[in-house]
Amino acid sequence: MTAVTDAPPFISRSIFSFKGCRMTHPIHTLIAGAAALSFAFSGSAYAQQQKPTPVPTTQVAAESVELTGPALWKVADEDTTIYLFGTVHALPEGLNWYTPAIEDALASSDTIVTEIPSGPETQARMQQLIMSKAILPEGTTLRGMLNEEQKSMYEGAMAKLGLPAEAFDRFEPWMAGLTLTMLPLLKEGYLPEQGVETRLEKLAGADKTRGALETMEFQIGIFDGFSEEDQVGFLMATAESVDEIKPMLDAMVAEWLEGDADALAKLMNEGLDDPEVAEALLYDRNANWAEWIDARLDSPGTIFMAVGAGHLAGEKSVQDLLDKRGIESIRVQ
């Protein structure tokens, strides 16, 4: 796979924990939160080429997990209701997360709001952004940016995944790192077409208004804005942890399915050591969304807001920040 337009079919939230160029807890920095950033790559060439093997539900939800359903909240005043639903951007086939409470909330909403816009235009725009932001200049290669030790570790991770060492040579390190994060999940049956946003888009039908909280340019800019040193550090942490990625996401999805937001937050927040990075990737965005909700309550209507589950769990979550504004979030499920 050498075409520069090849891109991963989705990218989950990646919380970095930088100590200079070194990440202090690679597995949590790679998977923790599994949802703050959702890049819409489901129509990419890579997704069309790969045929992941579906995995049974038991690989995600342990036998001890009681499936009560993912958590759902509601914020409301006299003439406005906003449902807050935490999502996972790729899932195995066969997970029955669409409970009656979620179905009723979506059916009653006139608008569905996600992190970034959806639709065919999104796919086309994403490919344009990849070409402009994630591709190295001619004459520069990814492996050429690595020292011998780093190159050996990276090539070893690629070999584990059955990929040629040169597959991502045209990608900037942040893009290669995000792609490498997702590949073990794809190979083990995590499918972007089974992701919550993709299914909600189909379930919502054509009669509902669509909205988005952020742009693709903004989300890509977060990663593209990191220094080369930190990008390479992220890539190395990914390569070192490639065997641990799926088990961590399995554990997080199990908590998500059970609706245990506190346990999910605990899993995600381990390794979230760098306050500046946490603010940029998580807390600042939560604050922006809380402000958006506060302003949206001034207009009548019913909105179904679907964002990465990591934003709706733990301290400084969207609900926590709404509470500081005097706005109550009621748990519906």
Image (cartoon, rainbow, N blue to C red):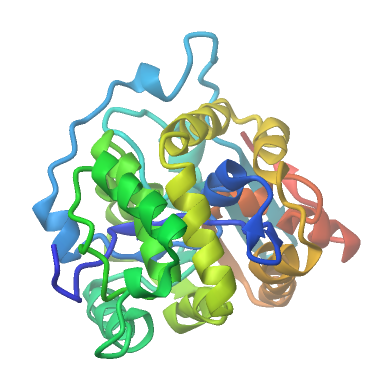
Q: What is the x, y in percent for residue 110? A: 45, 64
Determine whether, in the image, residue 125 is placed left or right of residue 245. left
Q: What residue is drawn where x is 65% and y is 43%?
A: 268
Q: What is the x, y in percent for residue 77? A: 75, 61
Determine whether, in the image, residue 221 is placed left or right of residue 84. left
Find the residue positioned furthest to the left: 49
In the displayed structure, 36 sits above or below 123; it is: above
In the displayed structure, 117 sits above or below 26; it is: below
Q: What residue is drawn where x is 31% and y is 39%?
A: 190
In the displayed structure, 226 sits above or below 244; it is: below
Rendered image quadrant of residue 313 = top right
Q: Is residue 237 visible?
A: yes
Determine whether, in the image, residue 49 is placed left or right of residue 250. left
Rendered image quadrant of residue 282 = bottom right
Q: What is the x, y in percent for residue 97? A: 42, 32
Q: Is residue 283 visible?
A: no
Most foreground residue, 77 or 279: 279
Q: Quadrant of the C terminus?
A: top right
Q: What is the x, y in percent for residue 75? A: 70, 55
Q: Quadrant of the N terminus?
A: bottom left
Q: What residue is drawn where x is 33% and y is 68%?
A: 143
Q: What residue is drawn where x is 48% and y is 42%?
A: 241
